[in-house]
Image: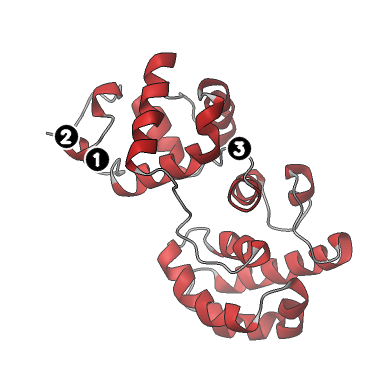
Amino acid sequence: MKPADIDEFFKRMAKANPEPRTELDAVNPYTFLVSVVLSAQTTDKGVNKATAPLYEKVKTPQEMLALGEDGLKTYIKTIGFYNVKSKSVIKLSQALVEKFEGRIPETREELMTLPGVGRKTANVVLNQCWGKPVIAVDRHVLRVANRTGLAKGETPDEIEDQLMKAIPDKWKRHAHHWLVLHGRYVCLARKPSCPDCPVSDLCAFKDKTP
């Protein structure tokens, strides 16, 4: 996609949704980080349903450690892989207390030292909690980037690198959310809603739906 088309792509995204927000519910950066970890292979809606009562009781890593792994499981047992995720959240909370006095790091490098936190999770937290102009590449972003021609690649790292180079700085703050929401509600995996797409004329996808 040409630079002018990329600029127009995000101009339209911004017009349709000036302040895109995550669909994960949280009360502070710590609970947001927990929700992101819990959301792997699970819908945001499912995570929100489980964490609503959890976050009434737990708002800090110290409180999570006091709740304990078994206690956490009672709240998130409706979430896929809840046994593994419970262990990850407890290890994560322990590391936050031991290494960062319970605060959420504001750099990717520090976030990625935490158990269960990879580059994508770190970028989501940096973008949502600290307003950093970074792009987290999940399956939606990977699909939208390849289909539209914004970027081409098979791995999240490839796509992230290309998007960071191609997207004008003025759009990077919200680019991640625009792409995620576009992939979640318009550019669907099985059958994209091309007639409802605000950037269809800019998109390089050859098999557009009528």
Numbered badge on residue 209:
2
Residue 135, quarter of the rendered image = top right
Q: Identify which residue, 149 or 115, lies in the foreground.
A: 149
Which callout, 1 or 2, points at the residue further toward the start of the chain?
1
- Mark 2 or 3: in front is 3
Report the residue at 74% width, 80% height from top.
63
Say what secondary structure mark 2 lies in: loop
Which callout, 3 or 1, points at the residue further toward the start of the chain?
3
The answer to whether marks 1 and 2 mark residues whose Cβ atoms lie closer than 8 Å is yes
Q: Position of residue 181 (x, y in %)?
A: 38, 47
Type of amino acid at the residue the image marks with label 1: Pro
- Tell whether 73 sits left or right of 205: right
Report how far apart the C-alphas of labels 2 and 3 lie in the structure: 31 Å
Numbered badge on residue 86:
none
Which callout, 2 or 3, points at the residue further toward the start of the chain?
3
Question: Which residue corresponds to mark 1?
Answer: 192
141, above or below 63, in the image: above
Type of amino acid at the residue the image marks with label 2: Thr
- Callout 3 crowding tier (Cα within 10 Å): few <14, some 14–19, many ≥20: many
Examine the rendering and report whether any part of residue 1 can be seen.
no
Residue 108, quarter of the rendered image = top right
Say what secondary structure mark 1 lies in: loop
Type of amino acid at the residue the image marks with label 3: Val
Q: Identify which residue, 149 or 11, lies in the foreground.
A: 11
181, above or below 63, in the image: above
Q: Where is residue 27 in the image (x, y as percent from the top left)?
A: 59, 69
Q: Quadrant of the N terminus?
A: top left
Question: Which residue corresponds to mark 3?
Answer: 134
Report how far apart the C-alphas of labels 1 and 2 lie in the structure: 7 Å
